Image (cartoon, rainbow, N blue to C red):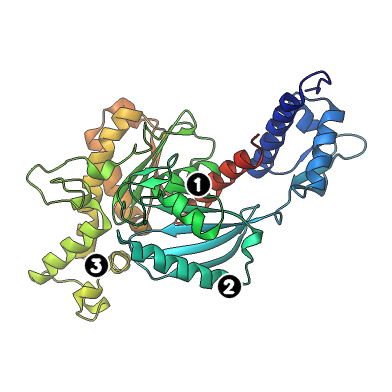
């Protein structure tokens, strides 16, 4: 792309900024490259590409990273994203606890801390989160001026464009959108994202869904979330709410869900449902090593204890997970018919059970799906685990901050 001198300065600046942002996105997503490849990629002349690279080096965005492989003659010089240009802060919030994470621009984890605050729909949650985050930054000598922005992943009906979470609508004061409220406190741009969609981006960019075009991710935590990739892009729906698999009705005469509806999939196949079912059957006399694991205090029982018991061969816990997996598989069979994916990736707390959860899911899909939908389909346990959500939030944050940085 040759920059034409007679164009108005604003048009020139817009075109240059578009090239800058696309180049930085490419370096973030694909790694180091040479000026020749940059020029071909953006249909620019070598002098134009060199000029833009020099400007980005001057501004601290790009660094020379050494020589690349040479087919003949002098090896090309490679350039990459400067990992130390900025740090980012990720707030990974769920119903049980919150993780505070600092990344550099190469997705290298700098610091991570778990804080034991449970998500509640009250302003006191954010007050405590702000206090603990400030302490976290101060303790680790993180100057807020070194932070580029904040990415927040959490459950709920999240409209990322508006920065709102309708499921937790009472977190802020004065009616401010949640992202704006956090941004105002820390004086940093803040982007809010649904945790399952963050996981889906993480899997697509860095995990088992890489280079896949049609993917479903099932997030089995306190609730059940579905991430959808169509033609290589995350599908959000009109307001960003697509994928609430946990709130399809599966038992019209079932239990009341926290959403106010009756018999949602969440009520029989989430981690909360698993713990409730375990407690009920243990109180009814079912023998299990779970009572030993929690020292006969069922108030302490958690999904991690059930997963531990499963791997120890506890028949009761295996039966519980098999039942949960079968119900999830039924729900996923409907999603398979709707979206025809090439892979389903299982993540979340219950994914730690491995084949004890994936096998019943796969058996149910085999039973309830048409054969032609099953033949190309594979079902996998996430290899990234919780890191998929963190990396997905980081990628989402980076892309939005780059667009903001180079907008005119």
Q: Is residue 237 left or right of residue 278?
A: right
The residue under label 1 is 202
Which residue is pictured at 18% across the width and 64% down the height? 278
Q: Is residue 384 left or right of residue 237?
A: right
Give residue 49's position: percent from left, percent from top: 81, 32
Which residue is pictured at 74% across the width and 43% down the height? 32
Which is more foreground, mark 3 or mark 2?
A: 2
Give residue 397's position: percent from left, percent from top: 55, 47
The residue under label 3 is 314
Pick the quarter of the image with the N terminus.
top right
Q: Secondary structure at mark 3?
A: loop
Give residue 187's position: percent from left, percent from top: 56, 56
The residue under label 2 is 138
From mark 1 to mark 3, how far is it between C-alphas?
Answer: 33 Å
Which is more foreground, mark 1 or mark 3?
A: 1
Mark closer to the chain start, 1 or 3: 1
Q: Residue furthest front?
A: 174
Q: Is residue 197 left or right of residue 183?
A: left
Mark closer to the chain start, 3 or 2: 2
Above or below: residue 262 compared with residue 377: below
Give residue 379's position: percent from left, percent from top: 38, 42
Packing grade of label 1 (10 A; few <14, some 14-19, many >=20) is many
Q: Give 81 or 362, whichever is nearer the viewer.
A: 81
Q: Secondary structure at mark 1?
A: helix
Q: Give 200 or 393, whichever is nearer the viewer.
A: 393
Q: Residue furthest bottom?
A: 295
């Amino acid at each position: 792309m040759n920059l034409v001198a007679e164009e108005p300065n604003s048009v020139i600046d817009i075109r240059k900024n578009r090239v800058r942002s696309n180049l930085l996105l490419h370096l973030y997503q694909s790694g180091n490259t040479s000026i020749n490849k940059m020029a071909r990629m953006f249909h620019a002349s070598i002098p134009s590409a060199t000029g833009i690279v020099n400007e980005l080096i001057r501004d601290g965005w790009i660094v020379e990273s050494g020589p690349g492989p040479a087919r003949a003659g002098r090896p090309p010089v490679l350039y990459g994203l400067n990992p130390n240009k900025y740090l980012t802060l990720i707030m990974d919030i769920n119903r049980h606890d919150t993780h505070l994470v600092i990344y550099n621009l190469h997705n290298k984890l700098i610091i991570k801390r778990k804080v034991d605050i449970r998500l509640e729909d009250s302003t006191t949650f954010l007050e405590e989160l702000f206090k603990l985050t400030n302490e976290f930054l101060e303790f680790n000598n993180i100057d807020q001026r070194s932070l580029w922005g904040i990415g927040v992943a959490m459950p709920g009906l999240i409209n990322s464009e508006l920065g709102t979470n309708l499921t937790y609508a009472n977190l802020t004061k004065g009616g401010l959108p949640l992202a704006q409220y956090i941004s105002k406190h820390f004086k940093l741009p803040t982007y809010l994202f649904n945790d399952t969609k963050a996981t889906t981006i993480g899997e697509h960019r860095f995990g088992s869904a890489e280079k896949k075009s049609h993917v479903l991710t099932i997030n089995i935590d306190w609730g059940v979330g579905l991430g959808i990739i169509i033609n290589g892009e995350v599908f959000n729906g009109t307001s960003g709410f697509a994928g609430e698999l946990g709130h399809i009705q599966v038992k019209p005469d079932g239990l009341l869900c926290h959403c106010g509806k009756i018999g949602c999939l969440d009520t029989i196949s989430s981690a909360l449902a698993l713990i409730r079912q375990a407690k009920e059957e243990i109180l009814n006399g079912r023998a299990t090593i779970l009572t030993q694991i929690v020292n006969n205090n069922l108030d302490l029982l958690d999904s991690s204890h059930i997963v531990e018991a499963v791997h120890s061969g506890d028949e009761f816990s295996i039966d519980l997970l098999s039942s949960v997996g079968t119900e999830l598989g039924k729900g996923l069979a409907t999603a398979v018919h709707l979206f025809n994916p090439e892979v389903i990736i299982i993540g979340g707390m219950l994914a730690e059970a491995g084949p004890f959860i994936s096998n019943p899911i796969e058996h149910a899909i085999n039973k309830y799906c048409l054969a032609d939908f099953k033949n190309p389909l594979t079902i996998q346990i996430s290899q990234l685990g919780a890191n998929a959500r963190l990396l997905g939030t980081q990628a989402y944050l980076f892309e939005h901050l780059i667009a903001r940085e180079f907008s005119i």
